[in-house]
Amino acid sequence: MKSIENNIPKHIVAKIDELSLIGNQYAAFDLDNTLLIGDIGEAVFAILVKNKIVKNFGWKNYIDLIKTDREKAYFKVIEVMNNLELRLVENITHDLIHTHAIEIELEGYRIPIPKPNTIMRSLVTLLNTSGIQVNVVTASNRVSAEIICWEYFGIHASNVFGARVDINNNKIIKIKFNEVPYGKEKVNVLKREFKNKPVFTAGDANWDRYLLSYTTQNGIRLWTGKDSEFKKLKEKYYKNLEFNQLLSE
């Protein structure tokens, strides 16, 4: 246990020790650029485009759409997976996890291949051994999210809530848009799945503030994003609450 704790900032370990753990308490973390350094949903999409499996919506199209409507862009990345074989998406995800490459070159862009944030990996282990179940809510596709959460963090698929993709009897992906956990939707997922609020949350972007704000009053909020945004959020929303920053590796 001590070797795990040595990898986590001491003040965060101390705060975890102070948490009230009466009843079934849980943590809810964002995945991309929070547990991971990089974005698994974007990386899988990039491979689909690079290998010409997806032809009618490229990486530049995605980047341009992000600038005008982030939520629509996230939906589009899921939508293009319609009618793909489940095994194909699973294999791409496993290949990304096990590759020695650090990025994907595509249309003049360099897309990072996600790796685990080792401090967050230690934190997941500490929380689980402390009796706090770790759950993940992410806008990345559920198939890839479940695989990478298990491979890197030992988080079971039942504790991973990603963008909904349905699988038919022939193992073909069928998209029925009813859930892409982004922004407020992350909180809606938690309200549906759990009776109470999480005692520990973590995120990296402004739209994760809905998740962070859903933490119990005396719980822990952890920021893994930019320092400048941390200071703004601290001042505006969490001045008198437990809001900690984890500097990027």
Image (cartoon, helix red, strand yellow):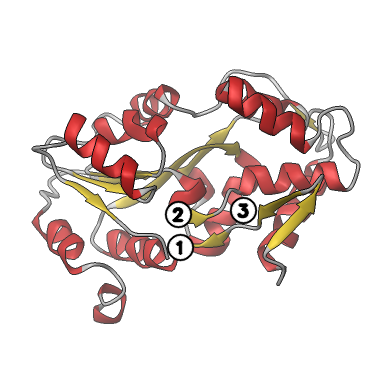
Horizontal arrangement in the rendering, residue 99 relative to residue 226 (left or right) = right
Amino acid found under the numbered disc labelled 3: Ile
**Quadrant of the image occupied by residue 141:** top right
Horizontal arrangement in the rendering, residue 25 relative to residue 93 (left or right) = left
**Residue at (67%, 65%) from the top-left corner?**
102
Q: Residues within 10 Å of mark 1 (few under 14, many from 20)?
A: many
The image position of residue 225, as x and y in percent, is 39, 48
Q: Is residue 158 above or below residue 149?
A: above
**Among numbered discs 2 and 3, the one appearing first in the sequence:** 2
**Contact, CB < 8 Å: mark 1 with mark 2?**
yes
Please state which of residues 88 and 245 is positioned toward the viewer in this rendering. 245
Q: Secondary structure at mark 3?
A: helix
Please state which of residues 203 and 83 is positioned toward the viewer in this rendering. 203
Instruction: Measure the C-alpha gap from mark 1 to mark 3.
Output: 16 Å
**Quadrant of the image occupied by residue 139:** top right
Quadrant, the N terminus: bottom left
What residue is disc 3 on?
Answer: 147
Q: Residues within 10 Å of mark 3 (few under 14, many from 20)?
A: many
Instruction: Measure the C-alpha gap from mark 2 to mark 3.
Output: 14 Å
Instruction: Measure the C-alpha gap from mark 1 to mark 2.
Output: 6 Å
**Among numbered discs 1 and 2, the one appearing first in the sequence:** 2
Q: Residues within 10 Å of mark 2 (few under 14, many from 20)?
A: many
**Among numbered discs 1 and 3, the one appearing first in the sequence:** 1
What residue is disc 1 on?
Answer: 117
Amino acid found under the numbered disc labelled 1: Asn
The image position of residue 241, as x and y in percent, is 12, 39
Amino acid found under the numbered disc labelled 2: Leu
What residue is disc 2 on?
Answer: 35
Q: Is residue 171 above or below residue 51?
A: above
